[in-house]
Amino acid sequence: MNGAQALLKTLADAGVEVCFSNPGTSEMHFVAALDGETRMRAVLCLFEGVATGAADGYARMAGKPAAVLLHLGCGLGNGLANLHNARKGKVPVLNIVGDHATWHVQYDAQLQSDIETVARNVSPGFVRTSQSTAALCQDAVDALVAARGLPGQVATLILPADVSWGEGGQPCPPPPAPTPPPAHEATVQAIAQAIRGSEKTVLLLGGQALREAALLDAARIAAHAPQGSVQLLAEVFPTRMERGAGLPFVERVAYLAEMAGVQLAGVRHLVLVDSKSPVSFFAYPGKASDLVPAGCTVHTLAAPEQDAAASLARLAQALGASGVQPPLQPAQRPDRPRGLLTAPKVCKAVGHLLPENAILIDEAITSGLMLNVMTAGCPRHDLLTLTGGAIGQGLPNAVGAAIACPDRPVIALIGDGTAMYTIQALWSMAREQLNVTAIVFNNASYSVLNVELDRVGAEEGGAKARAQLDLHGPVLNFAQLAQGMGVHAVRASTAEDFCTALEYALAQPGPHLIEALVPESLSGAKRKVLPWLLRSLPSLPPAVARALKKKVAP
Amino acid sequence: MNGAQALLKTLADAGVEVCFSNPGTSEMHFVAALDGETRMRAVLCLFEGVATGAADGYARMAGKPAAVLLHLGCGLGNGLANLHNARKGKVPVLNIVGDHATWHVQYDAQLQSDIETVARNVSPGFVRTSQSTAALCQDAVDALVAARGLPGQVATLILPADVSWGEGGQPCPPPPAPTPPPAHEATVQAIAQAIRGSEKTVLLLGGQALREAALLDAARIAAHAPQGSVQLLAEVFPTRMERGAGLPFVERVAYLAEMAGVQLAGVRHLVLVDSKSPVSFFAYPGKASDLVPAGCTVHTLAAPEQDAAASLARLAQALGASGVQPPLQPAQRPDRPRGLLTAPKVCKAVGHLLPENAILIDEAITSGLMLNVMTAGCPRHDLLTLTGGAIGQGLPNAVGAAIACPDRPVIALIGDGTAMYTIQALWSMAREQLNVTAIVFNNASYSVLNVELDRVGAEEGGAKARAQLDLHGPVLNFAQLAQGMGVHAVRASTAEDFCTALEYALAQPGPHLIEALVPESLSGAKRKVLPWLLRSLPSLPPAVARALKKKVAP
């Protein structure tokens, strides 16, 4: 048994059943060994960023890591952005990077580069170059232990070609499942004490705390607190958030720091539950990055390495809230939209038609502003978002999510700019006949950058500057791009056509792309205020909405 | 004047006139400053690998660096593969990576990552994070000095947003041009002495030594040497090679180590001229990586930091060969091909029609095996190849080459697998209306990996393994992909149609894509012997060809 064969057996024994791959010569023995391990499904991707993003999406939904197979330092570079998203989302990924044979490295051949150095950017916790065929499977098990956490992480195993092809591979037994501890009792009591004080408190839920059991306990705590003093917020870009009718509704922290400041105004206690203390996504001249208001105490109920759900259960118990019936989101859908298509109407149509148990992927940037509102009362679904801010995540995530959950419909909403980074994902959807509906908003603009150009105070932007944010000349045709990769696709410019196309896509198996031709609606002063108004007003308490309106009025 | 404005002035003063960009929020002040610097052309790319590959192609043809503008560590990751190709090709690139404001880094926001660490993979010689607006322009000048070499390199300047937007920018004067020294006289004399000994000698030409003046002196030395004892070889993947009728013909070292071994058999003196001692591209079980034959002495006439052309001129002078008339490639073209299209017929058609002064980009992998032979006697042209082995270089290189040389036709031959890594380059071609003809060979296969699967000895590859190298199900439609990005495109499956399409593309301005539908012809035993037979036999000396045939006969 060679190294690659033993590695595949070890992985399969440990429950790693999918490998998203873009191999080259140094990975040929791994590829050859695939036929000997029936439990491993190999999914070919035509670009490494698709493979890494698919592994991210898979793990978010499967709750366990997939393997990625990349070719040397350059393949890792191509896969880096979506590994970054996985890292920031605390998602487990077993990142296998093939390397030259150990004795070939000294010759500095064309593809030689420093793989470990690049890997540290996304795998600060585990980078190891396997040194021998005999040690390979233990290395893989160590990588798996690191990847599965908690917190989940990207573990990079560098696999030299001769370690792969050498004889003497020794499969290793699977590692035990991780058993994260809950919060310490003293911590629970201290936070319970703070909550009993009736000062304004926010439970900021992230990571594992956005799943049903944790959400219910958090909602019980809020319902039980005196005078509505405890509110729930979710981190701005959740890895995986369970939501919809029958679950507690949780508002997300806004992307725009100006708006997040309104959400957090007056908070005296911020309780982190598998989340980070909120900071501005970018820095802006003259504005603070730390969004925690003055006078607010930050508490950590559950750090990422702790069991968030169990910690919330303990807190609910400490407060006597375990038996409380929490308020749940009632079922409600928006009406079927009509007339000329706009981005909000696309979101409305999705809300009108979202099927039961869907997986919703939101990488629509400005065009998806209304998505949260429009789907809040839809049948229960999972929402996956852009955890690390590295665009090009949505289509690959859809590949992985659909493979993890073949019986659930996957709907991915993607901006036109962002779709182009990993457009090759469409081919893998076609090849694997995945039940994915990709909705690409074509407004022919890096619309969010028009907002950001203003926000950073670079308001003098002239024709050359605006051209850098403009996707006209030529306007992309995503339907043609999809058809060129074997995916059924249509363009829609009316709400009626869009709804028909979405109904068709959801009814027919296999992948579909719907290109929504929408106007670039954010311009001038509107660009500055509309995004957070649109996203936030319908779901905000009236007092906050009033404060916000006042703040952003011209 | 803010930092970005001063930086743009400094760059333009130093002759940096093009910036290939894919900006994000942290680069908005750089973008806003573009309108104030009329000498800087900004070329928007929809994926960072296009921007970096375009900068590579631009510098190869312009002989000076362009700037690249990338967004944080993830943007750099996406651009890494083509920066790797630039690094291996000793190509100057000024790689500007925007970063968060210096005071924002501590908050570990979503897009925070360790940029310097990633940059070291491609910029081992120069990575610097600018620390203040006042220092920025000197940092940029230092980066330019490093980039321009010799040898040229990728210099990475990390530009925090607050350094960019801060007031107090101070433009710096342009740095002096590099003045590389020629070979030491003692070295020249020692190599001349070796050549006079009439033992079999190879001048291995790379980098700057593949341009006209150097080629002519090398050919004079070979013509002057006794009994044909000196042969010329070019490195396997030249950065830029001037060739065609009227220039010396120089055979390239073969990609396949087995074949390179035949080319180098019996060589007693190997003289490196801005080239590396040849090594196998990949390692193979039981095969040596170092291709220098036993008993061969390796001399370095010109290291990459020396003036290769001046060094060859000195060597010619020392040998009394300066006045020799070297043999030059006669003008000759293959006939117009007929019948069902195959990859060799595409190469033949290119040879039949290649216009004067073309820029030929070869990233066709197995399908381009006949290209060298078919174009050897074409009108003079430049050849750009895959210097670092990181596929996805050809289409972006074409963008940059066409911008550097707007009056020269660019013809890029690309494999189907490789085209998909940076397919977004087509959009930039359309937007900038570049005179590029992209020829994509569609054989629905990672054909070279079928060869490599055999070569590494992994011959047991079954259905799952072969599926990882197979691009069927669905077959890509590159004409549709191109049309979706605004590029005129056709498919051809006969040689007649292909020739018509190529004539049309060369006659009409702007970009064109021709999709050549060709069979995947390498299978079974043929895969093992055909590649180097095809590539090499027509141009090899008869004795070598005979030896080769014997070696590879079944």
Image (cartoon, coloured by chain):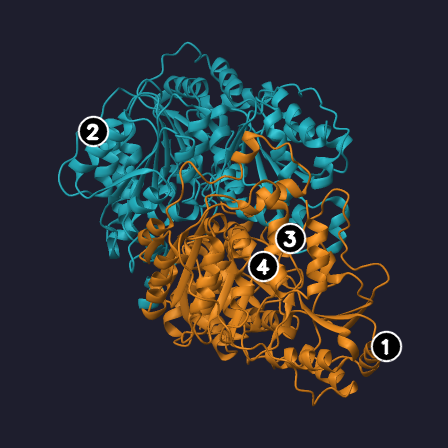
Chain colours: A cyan, B orange
Q: Residues within 10 Å of mark 2 (few under 14, many from 20)?
A: some
Q: Which of these two is toward me, A458 or A94? A: A94
Residue to which mark 1 is pinned: B197
C-beta proximity under 8 Å, tags 2 and 3: no
> Which circle, 4 or 2, is nearer the viewer?
4
Extreme-bottom residue of the structure: B323
Mark 4 or 1: in front is 1
Secondary element at tag 3: loop
- Residue A334 disc label: 2
What is the x, y in percent for residue B378? 50, 72
Q: Is residue B251 above or below residue A154?
A: below
Q: Amino acid at mark 2?
A: Pro
A95 left or right of B169? right
Task: Give the alpha-carbon distance from disc 2 to disc 1, as whole Å.
Answer: 89 Å
Q: Chain of mark 1?
A: B
Mark 4 or mark 1, which has the lower sequence index?
4
At a point 43% along the width and 74% down the height, the residue shown is B408
Q: Position of residue B35 (x, y in %)?
A: 36, 71
Q: Nearer the viewer, mark 2 or mark 3?
A: 3
User: Does the rendering let one see residue B359?
Assistant: yes
Residue A323 numbered mark, or none: none
**Of the residues tagged 2 and 1, which is closer to the observer?**
1
Give me the residue at 38% from left, 50% from top: B478
Q: Is residue A193 above or below residue A93?
A: above
